[in-house]
Amino acid sequence: MAGSASAQTTELTVMISGGFKAAWDRLSPRYAAREGIQINTVAGPSIGKTPQAIPARLARGEHSDLVIMVGDALGNLEKQGRTLPGSRVELADSRIGAVVKQGATPVAIDSESTLRATLQYTTRFAGAVIRQSAQPDEASQLLRWLASPEVQKVVRETGLHPIGQTQPAGATQPIRQRDTVQ
C-alpha cells in the first residue's frame, strides 16, 4: 500500500484504553508514516458503563478495526465473539504499585494474596482485530509491529500509568510489589 500514488489511503480505526495511550501516541505516527496509512485513534476506558467505554462503543456499533486494552476486558470481547479468533497479541505488562501520603496507612499489597484482593483487574495490555474490521490484514500487521522488539523498547521507555501516574502531590511513600508478582 505504501508508495502507491493511485491507491486510496488505508484508514485504520483503533480504540485504545488510557494505560497504553502514552506509548501509542509516540508509536502510531511512526507506523502511519512508515506504511503510508491514516490511523484514527478513539480513546476510552477498557471497562465500565460510561458511553465512552470501549465495550459500550462496540455494542452501539461504532466502527473499529483494532482494540488495545486491558487484557481481561479484551477477554470479555473475545468471549462475545467481537474479535477475530486468533488475532489477540499480548503487548505489555504494566508494573503495579501504589503511593500513600506520608504517615498514612499503606495499602496492603505486600504479598501476592493481598495484592490480588486489593486490585480489581489485571494490568496486562493486549490487542485484537475486531471481527467487523474493514482492514483486518492491515490491523493484524499493526499488532505484529506493536509486539516487535523495537517497539517494545519504546513501550518500556514510555511506561504505563499505574506507577507512573500515581504520584499525587504529597505522596512520598511509593510501595512496589515484589518482582515475583509483577
Image (spheres, helix red, strand yellow):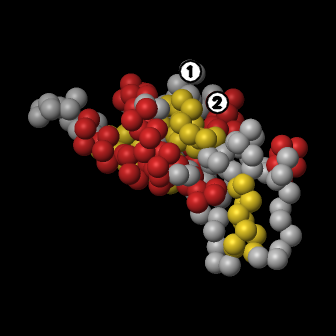
The residue that appears at 43% across and 31% down in the rendered structure is: 148
Is residue 157 visible in the rendered image? The answer is yes
Badge number at residue 86: 1
**Nearer the observer, 11 or 16:** 16
The type of residue carrying mark 2 is: Glu
Tell me the SS state at disc 1: loop
> Label 2: which residue?
78
Q: Is 140 placed left or right of 59 in the picture?
A: left
Depicted 52 relative to depicted 78: above or below = below
**Tag 1 or tag 2, which sits nearer the N-term?**
2
| x, y percent for residue 121 | 74, 46
Assign the C terminus to one quadrant of the image. Answer: top right
| x, y percent for residue 10 | 28, 36
CA gap between label 2 and label 1 equals 10 Å
**Nearer the observer, 64 or 16:** 16
Could you classify mark 1 by the number of other residues whose Cα lies within 10 Å: few (under 14), some (14-19), or many (20 or more)? few
Q: Residue furthest left?
A: 5
